[in-house]
Image (tube, helix red, strand yellow):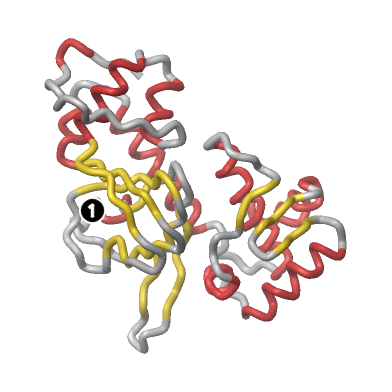
Amino acid sequence: MAVNSARLPEAAAGRAHSCSTCAFTNLCRNDGIDENVVAQVEALLVDETSQYAEGQHIFREGDPFDSIAAVRGGTVKTYVLDREGREQVLGFHLPGEVVGLNAIHSQSFPCNALALEPVVLCRFSFRRMSELAALIPDLQSRLFRLLSEDIGKAALLSGDFSADERMAAFLLSLSRRYARRGFSPTRFNLTMPRTDIANYLRLAPETVSRVLRRFRDDGITQIDRRDLRLLDIGRLESLALPVLRH
């Protein structure tokens, strides 16, 4: 990703934010941009770093959109409510991933975002990001890729799949997403409640518990409360194949 460092607007002193897992930072570093330039880009784009307590809303449906949030720590759940007030979970955002991409078109958030645990966010000004696209020619295409990933995650479980296939695809998706950010792909916390997992997978909560027990008994996973270990990635990949090929 080429960038003209000489033309970057002057950044405020001390505003460089570092996050080794951030989607935007990694895009730059992986393409060989000098870290001093990355720091300038971060200082230019980042409006603020915010902290949210477990159960606190980051934004609500209908709130005006002016920035994209990158998760630095914690897990964020996005969801909508139907006319009867029933919740439909849309997804979970992990450290290094971004929240709010689906608000770009309408300029208002089409869903709610909730902190499932203590969360730290960096907010990126979308206006500044658009301006910066003139200095970083590939930035717009990178945003499109992030949008594509977001759409792909939302469509992952839209087909007619079994409970085992859905759960396997969900766990494998988490594994791959953690791996992309430099975390362990085989051991991580299930930070989302079982009821939220069930809602997201369009399964009954008791079905989720039953499938997780079966995976444990079959030696595919090992789970202790929220601590999850994937013991047989090959089995998971075989189970998830119909979903991931869909």
Secondary element under disc 1, as helix, strand or loop, is: loop
Q: Residue at x 81, y 56 (%)?
A: 220
Quadrant for the N terminus in the image = top left
- Please tell me which residue lies in front, 148 or 90: 90
Image: 241 above or below 62: above
Count of numbered circles in the view = 1
x and y percentages locating residue 209 in the rendered image: 70, 74
Quadrant for the C terminus in the image = bottom right
Q: Residue at x 20, y 64 (%)?
A: 63
Q: On the image, numbered disc 1 is attached to which residue?
A: 105
Label 1, residues with CA under 10 Å away: few <14, some 14-19, many ≥20? few
Image: 26 above or below 207: above
x and y percentages locating residue 57 in the rendered image: 31, 66
Image: 174 above or below 190: above
x and y percentages locating residue 82 in the rendered image: 36, 81
The residue furthest top is 6
The residue furthest right is 218
Question: Picture quarter containing residue 85?
Answer: bottom left
The residue furthest bottom is 84
Residue 180 in the figure: left or right of residue 125: right
Which three-letter amino acid code belongs to the residue tagged 1?
Answer: His
Q: Residue at x 29, y 23 (%)?
A: 39
Q: Residue at x 37, y 62 (%)?
A: 53
x and y percentages locating residue 240 in the rendered image: 70, 55
Residue 10 in the figure: left or right of residue 72: left
